[in-house]
Amino acid sequence: MGSTIALIISLAVLGVILFAGVSGRTAAEGSFFDRVSTKEIQGFLAVFIIFHQTVILLYNFGIDVGKMIFFYPYGILAVAFFFFCSGFGLIRRWMTDNEYIKGFMRRRIFTVLVPFFICNYIYLTDALLSNIMKGDHFGFGELICSFFGIFLLNSQMWFAVEIMILYVAFRIVFARVKKPLTGILIMTLIVLVMMTIGFSSGHSDLPIMSYWFKGEWWYNTILMFPAGMFYSYYEERINKIIRKAFVPVVIIALALFAGADYIHRRLLDFNVYWREFFGDSNHLLYKLEGLGVETVLEILFLILIIAVMSKIKFSNPVLKYLGKISLEIIMINFLMIGSLYFVYERFGMVVYLIVVLISTLICASIIYIIKNFVLERRSGLFDGKIQ
């Protein structure tokens, strides 16, 4: 019963966040997948990820999460959208701003690097205090690697690492190429190499901590980064197709999504990415199957999102606020989920979710302000502008 109420409250919160202030778009708006709109959607999905990660932790603790299992399979869709928007935005700016590469490190990479290390040292402090209390200790190598962010004390920090690698690759590639399509193809090749590294790296022996590229999450959504680049390059043509054939596009995409979703959930029940732990000699083939199905699912999801955004504009002050701190939410939420587990034990899932959500938003806001202070710019947290 508690999980059912928790699911209803979670979906209600997400619904209010997303649909408050919703409005229709006119046919005159040729480009609707803009930076402001996508950033606000990312803010909504960041809250979705909080619920997703909470369910994962409880599930991994062997707790029956009941109806809240709804959030379990769909975290990849939120992350896929983040990668897609990043690839889309980079190409859009590069094609429209001849000076975009200048100052790229500060504008893009440092805005991820600074909050990454702020969160990393928070996790390191928490881990060291926990070790002191339990009488455990890190090895010297792990401690040094943790300090530099190579050994992740929270494996959910992987997204920041991978997006920074992609930004660096983008900076190198697009400082030299002249044609966007050439650069996009090179970036696609780089992403495929990164996927291969992740695919062959297996999993960490530790439940939360890991070195880079350990786990399927390192490679099962990153392909949406060059997908976003291709969409940006062919945006006008794709948008025309979606506007002219909106109904059939949505119906077909929904039908295919439902089928892919069913297969995906069955594969997750089968632990498709973890078959080596069951002594299965075909575990690599199963991983390829999982990757293929999830890639199709992500593409169909993005088609549906683009189609919906062509007709509807989601915008309100809460979405703007969440959009600004979405990266910080993703990186710090796991600390709140783990540290506040005692709330679940004492008060149940509903109170636990509310406390985790509020505390994550507060901490993410503080980290956002500190980041902007380090980068010597005002926080702009409540002024409505997307930074």
Image: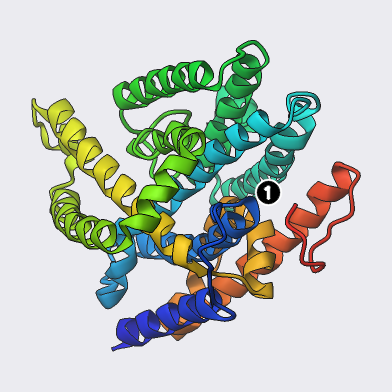
Is 97 situated above or below 248? Answer: above
Q: Nearer the viewer, residue 343 or 32?
A: 32
Q: Is residue 115 left or right of residue 157?
A: right
For disc 1, the marked residue is 122
Q: Tell which residue pokes out farthest to the top in this image.
A: 176
Q: Residue at x 33, y 33 (%)?
A: 203
Q: Residue at x 79, y 63 (%)?
A: 381
Q: Nearer the viewer, residue 234 or 227?
A: 234
In x, y percent, where is residue 49? 46, 60
Is residue 150 something one can see in this rendering? no
Q: Nearer the viewer, residue 324 or 63?
A: 324
In x, y percent, where is residue 359? 63, 70
* Quadrant in which residue 247 is drawn: bottom left
* Quadrant in which residue 32 is drawn: bottom right
Circle 1 residues within 10 Å: few <14, some 14–19, many ≥20: some
**Image coloring type:** rainbow
Is 186 situated above or below 27? Answer: above
Q: How many callouts does the rendering have?
A: 1
In x, y percent, where is residue 189? 41, 17
